[in-house]
Amino acid sequence: MEAMTTTPHRRVAWESLSRFLVAGVLLGMLLGNVTESYVAGALKGAFARLTGKEHYSAGMAVTVDARGIPYTEYTGGAKPRNPVTVCIKADEYYAKDDPAAKERFLNCADWLVEHAVAHKGYSLLEYDFPYSRYGMTAPWRSALANGMALTALTRAHARTGSLRYLTTARALMAAFHVPEDEGGFAVAMPQGVWYEEYADEGGTRPRVLNGMIFALFGLHDIYSYLGDRDAKRLFEDGVAAVKAELPRYDNRGHSYYDLLGNDPGPYHAIHVEQLAKLYALTNEPVFKQYHDRWAAYREPTYVTRLLTRPTPLRVAVAGVNAAAIWLLMLGLWALRRRR
């Protein structure tokens, strides 16, 4: 008789618990449409505090050594130095007005000087690890790395007056003349010259858009700093190539990450920002045209992205939201019981 009376109670309890859990999950997912950026930012901050690593992008995290120079930790545990990450950290330090950040900025600039590999008439910031996504084998090179280093090194020269920074910057700029097939990263186009972010004789030549444009910004920075005619011509050749190729990156109002048709993810917003800056620098109408077109694109909702492209961070946001909903529901239940 006891088994007959307790089983229905257990079934009711289980059904109530199931509804409670499902309601929390569903409401947490819907809440993510509003709270995603806030919760994701908080999770990234907690990740950095707990592990000493900064969340950089999918599959990567950044740690810094005692001098503030970063390692990039990739999926699988590899922790190489990535010249672009060093340049990004240098930019972060440069923006801070405190002695420790200023010292770390110069440490990063010194690393760039020390690791620029000299070739006949030019230098490269080479990558000493493979990158399977685009078929890259070590050592490979990147216009993005060389271009971003131009910005860091001219800033370091402005702060210190040390010619070593300027000498290295000029050698890195000279690499923009070297064809990809001859060990550089320049690709002659029917109009202008493309500076390849992932350059290697055996690679897939993806023509990554954001990397090309960031390289142009580096060329413009050294031109602005030195008034160098060669830097201006390199910049103008690159601008001509982007003008001609930009329509190929349009995906019905969205952008492609590269000419292989890869989804840009967060780089779509970066493309929009880059085109606004390119238009400001050049006054070329095509950059405003695609800036406006891509800026009007509306990303799918958080729920859609969670269901179609469930990254660990998106799942974590849903989990945090669900936990908050469950706690709220429990609090309301307890308050109702008390009354």
Image (cartoon, rainbow, N blue to C red):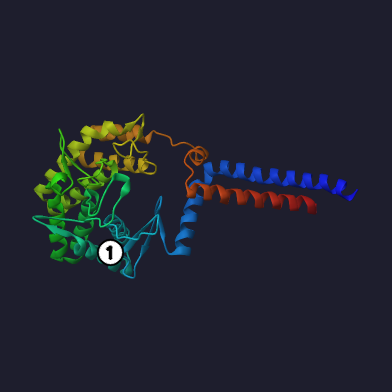
**The image quarter in which residue 22 lies:** top right
Position in image of residue 156 (x %, y %): 21, 62
Is residue 33 depicted above or below 224 in this figure? above
Answer above or below: position of 239 versus 68: above
From this viewpoint, is residue 284 visible?
Answer: no
Q: Is residue 79 above or below residue 239?
A: below
**45 left or right of 11?**
left
Most distant residue in the right direction: 1
In the rendered structure, the answer to whether residue 312 lies left or right of residue 16 reads left
- Point out residue 210 in the picture as x, y percentages from the top left corner: 29, 43
Q: Nearer the viewer, residue 90 or 69?
A: 69
Give the residue drawn at x 61%, y 51%.
323
Q: Secondary structure at mark 1?
A: helix
Q: Residue 266 sits in which quadrant?
A: top left
Q: Amino acid at mark 1?
A: Phe
**Can residue 261 be seen?**
yes
Residue on which the image places disc 1: 105
Indicate the quadrant where residue 48 lies.
bottom left
**Which residue appears farthest toward the top when viewing the image?**
252
| Mark 1 crowdedness (10 Å alpha carbons): few <14, some 14-19, many ≥20 | many
